[in-house]
Amino acid sequence: MDEFEKVERLRQRANVTYEEAREALKESDGDLLDAMVYLEKQGKVDAPKESTHSTEYEKQSQYKDVKETVSGQEKKEEKRSFGQKFKHFIQIVCKKLQENSLHIEHKDVEVVSLPLWAVLLVLLFTWHVVWILILVSLFFDCHYHLEGKDNMDSANDVMEKASAAAEHVKDEFEKL
């Protein structure tokens, strides 16, 4: 490294003028570290801040106690207004309705697949007709099941039991 590069480097690190950096290097025989010490002694550069190092272990508080975390979340929840809680609930419900769907099969062939939000709208406006159609369709070998991101095993179990009950009633009726 030539003299000019050393002067520039010292000037940038020590934040001094060109002449001061050149003089410090001249006094320290071109050694950058000695030049920094020279500038510190003259008071042109602040001495590095002292730091201590230890081999002792200090417990870090980056991990919180589970009880503290839960109580903090509960307090945060309590601070939310009824409107905020209701909005959050509606957002979750809308997400679930969009991610999941109802599938209707007749003799193992899928007839209809509807997102749950569409099913909900149909039920809201024509619930009395839909329930009758569902009951009748169960007797004509239609099966219903839910699919999507959520675990809907319990709902699918109920729908399978309804299909089995309809099959059982149908078999009993045929025996008569």
Image (spheres, rainbow, N blue to C red):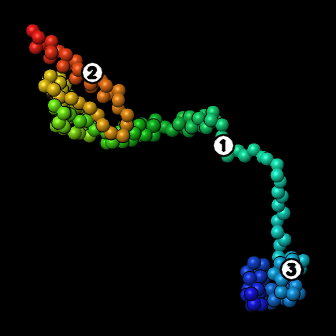
Amino acid under disc 1 = Tyr
Question: Would you name the residue on which mark 1 appears?
Answer: 63
Amino acid identity at mark 3: Asp
Q: Earlier in the sequence, mark 1 or mark 2?
A: 1
Q: Earlier in the sequence, mark 3 or mark 1?
A: 3
Q: Could you say which quadrant of the image residue 15 lies in?
A: bottom right
- Label 1: state its secondary structure: loop
Above or below for 156 versus 2: above
Residues at marks 1 and 2, CA–CA distance in whole angstroms: 48 Å
Q: Residues within 10 Å of mark 1 (few under 14, many from 20)?
A: few
Question: Which image quarter holds the C terminus?
Answer: top left
The number of callouts visible is: 3
Q: Position of residue 73 (x, y in %)?
A: 57, 37
Query: In the rendered image, which residue does mark 2 sit on?
Result: 161
Q: Eyeballing the image, is 52 above or below 29? A: above
Disc number placed over residue 34 in the picture, else none = 3
Q: In the rendered image, which quarter contains the N terminus?
A: bottom right
Along the horizontal axis of the image, is 40 left or right of 165? right
Estimate the spatial distance between the alpha carbons at disc 3 and disc 1, rounded to whole Å.
44 Å
